[in-house]
């Protein structure tokens, strides 16, 4: 039986779409470093949950975890990576921006909304640099092994507290709550459809990717087993 979850993995993609491929100045390594490296392996739960949603498009090109009208340099269609590296050889036209939004951003969010009635909880899944990058709220700071976020209200408090306890049972590391991340656009914009939480795992090698996946899955199974009894 599948877990009653929507699992969203928005930042594991590494593809530069054809609409901007000739204009993109980033190397494959720079795209990888700006992505949620390891997320595709850690959160590979497609066969375990009612809906698994991801995108092949690199976060550096289209960030589906930003508001559609967020036009900052680290916004929905970025101009620089999180390490301050320019993404494009020349600025994108508004027409190109609109094409990227229509082809890659809006379908991701429609997909979430379409399946919201089939799930009990949405889980937005990320990995984070072990040390805060230049654009982060904790620049230069060491990060915990796990950060769980609910943006102070995207999930019922008793559910979120239970989720924290389940991750604490599954992981032998610091479990931080709403720090350094409080929760991004995905959980904030879709929490009116069903409860959402955000998971961030450090990319520090305190466990290998397979073991990180196993422990995330165990925590979610434990959580779903507990909440089913209520």
Image: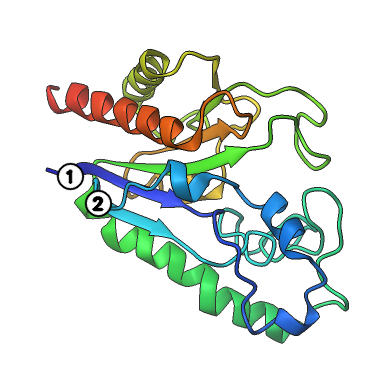
Where's residue 76, x and y in %? 66, 61
x and y percent of residue 21 in the render? 71, 80
In the rendered image, which residue does mark 1 sit on? 2
Q: Residue at x 30, y 63 (%)?
A: 114
Q: Nearer the viewer, residue 11 or 203?
A: 203
The quadrant in which residue 57 appears is: bottom right
- Residue 75 found in image quarter: bottom right
Which label sits on residue 47? 2
Which residue does the image show at 74% across and 30% down from the upper left? 131
Callout 2 touching callout 1 (CB < 8 Å): yes
Q: From the viewer's perspective, is residue 123 above or below residue 225?
A: below
Mark 2 is surrounded, within 10 Å at the Cα level, by few (under 14), some (14 to 19) or many (20 or more) other residues, namely few
Judged from the image, the secondary structure of the residue bearing numbered disc 1 is loop
Where is the C terminus found, in terms of image quarters? top left
Q: Indicate the quadrant where residue 136 lies.
A: top right
Disc 1 crowd rating (10 Å Cα; few below 14, some 14-19, many 20+) is few
Q: Earlier in the sequence, mark 2 or mark 1?
A: 1
Q: Which mark is residue 16?
A: none
């Amino acid at each position: 039986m599948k877990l009653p979850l929507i699992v969203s993995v928005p930042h594991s993609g590494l593809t530069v779409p054809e609409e901007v491929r000739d204009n993109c100045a980033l190397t494959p390594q720079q795209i990888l470093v700006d992505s949620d490296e390891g997320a595709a392996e850690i959160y590979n739960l497609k066969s375990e949950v009612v809906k698994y949603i991801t995108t092949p498009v690199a976060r550096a090109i289209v960030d589906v975890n930003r508001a559609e009208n967020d036009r900052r340099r680290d916004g929905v269609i970025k101009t620089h990576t999180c390490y301050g590296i320019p993404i494009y050889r020349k600025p994108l036209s508004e027409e190109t921006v609109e094409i990227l939004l229509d082809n890659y951003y809006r379908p991701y969010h429609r997909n979430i909304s379409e399946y919201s009635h089939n799930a009990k909880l949405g889980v937005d899944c990320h990995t984070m640099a072990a040390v805060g990058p230049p654009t982060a709220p904790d620049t230069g700071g060491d990060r915990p092994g796990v950060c769980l976020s609910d943006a102070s209200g995207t999930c019922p408090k008793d559910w979120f507290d239970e989720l924290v306890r389940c991750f604490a049972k599954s992981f032998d590391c610091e479990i931080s709550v709403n720090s350094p991340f409080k929760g991004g656009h995905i959980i904030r914009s879709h929490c009116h459809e069903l409860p959402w939480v955000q998971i961030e795992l450090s990319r520090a090698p305190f466990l290998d990717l397979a073991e990180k996946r196993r422990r995330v899955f165990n925590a979610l199974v434990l959580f779903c087993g507990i909440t089913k009894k209520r």
